Image: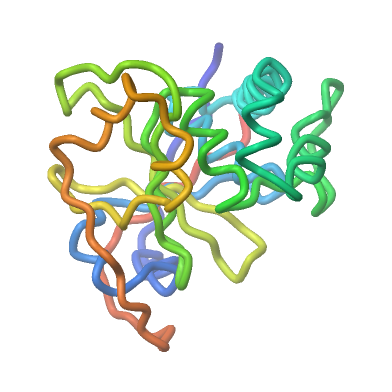
């Protein structure tokens, strides 16, 4: 598969820093922007998985749908009243570019679904809702460096961008529902990481020097 080209935007190093909780700015190496077409959340996941091409977001969509259908009883319990909304959002087998807001990737509703479907650590660094999602199934590798972390933040509730965290960066506190539904063999996913609460700061004016990488359309 052909990957999208990348270019670093000079003069854009503060373009998305206002989307991040200030305490996390020193731990960010770069921000990766993606196409803004309603599928940006899925594109961020695809980018983190190394699938940053024209079809990567479709693969993410399909895997999430397979997960929620394959383990429907689990996800009905985990998602509760949000199950139908999430199921309808990811149930787009013939999905084309350009998504309505009902099909957008949303957090925290889809956080555990993403982390479980792809065996990754998903980190939401958005203002007021920062949290970490871990898989509900699967035994983790003993090497922390082999555990893939995909971090994201949301701009004004309309656009997701991927955040490249630095080595040994702390992670936001665990999403509360994880402890309730995780299998015993999976609890080791949290070992070796530093989780801490974020105290939201009511300001959008944060100065930072963070390079922004733009993923062009192929």
**Residue that appears at 62% across and 35% down:** 217
Where does the image place residue 18, in percent across and percent down from the top left? 42, 74
Residue 73 percent location from the top left of the image: 69, 25
Q: Quadrant of the N terminus?
A: top right
- The percent position of residue 88, horizontal first and vertical second, equals 83, 37
Identify the residue at the far top of this view. 1
> In terms of depth relative to the viewer, which is nearer, 89 or 34?
89
Residue located 48% across and 23% down the image? 118
Please tell me whether residue 49 is drawn above or below residue 101 in the rendered image: above
* Most foreground residue, 164 or 177: 177
Quadrant containing the C terminus in the rendered view = top right
Q: Is residue 102 left or right of residue 160?
A: right
Count of numbered circles in the view? 0
Residue drawn at (26%, 52%), measured in percent from left and top?
171
Towards the viewer: 183 or 43: 183
Is the image coloured rainbow, by chain, by secondary structure, or in one colour?
rainbow
Q: In terms of depth relative to the viewer, which is nearer, 131 or 24?
A: 131
Task: Judge whether 106 appears above or below 17 on screen.
Answer: above
Q: Residue at x 47, y 57 (%)?
A: 153
- Image coordinates of residue 22 in percent, x first then y, are 29, 74
């Amino acid at each position: 598969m052909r990957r999208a080209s990348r270019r670093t935007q000079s003069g854009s190093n503060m373009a998305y820093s206002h989307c991040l909780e200030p305490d996390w700015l020193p731990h960010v190496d770069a921000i990766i922007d993606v196409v803004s077409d309603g599928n940006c959340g899925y594109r961020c996941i695809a980018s983190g998985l190394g699938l940053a091409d024209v079809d990567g977001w479709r693969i993410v969509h399909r895997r999430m749908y397979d997960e929620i259908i394959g383990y429907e009883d689990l996800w009905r319990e985990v998602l509760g009243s949000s199950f139908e909304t999430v199921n309808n959002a990811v149930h787009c087998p013939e999905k084309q570019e350009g998504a309505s807001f009902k099909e957008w990737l949303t957090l925290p509703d889809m956080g555990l679904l993403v982390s479980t479907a792809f065996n990754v650590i998903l980190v939401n660094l958005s203002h007021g809702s920062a949290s970490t999602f871990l898989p509900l199934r699967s035994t983790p590798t003993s090497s922390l460096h082999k555990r893939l972390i995909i971090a994201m933040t949301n701009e004004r509730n309309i656009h997701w961008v991927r955040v490249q965290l630095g080595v040994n960066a702390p992670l936001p506190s665990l999403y509360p529902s994880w402890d309730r539904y995780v299998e015993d063999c999976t609890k080791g996913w949290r070992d070796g990481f530093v989780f801490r609460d974020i105290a939201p700061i009511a300001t959008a004016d944060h100065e930072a020097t963070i390079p922004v990488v733009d993923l062009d359309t192929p």
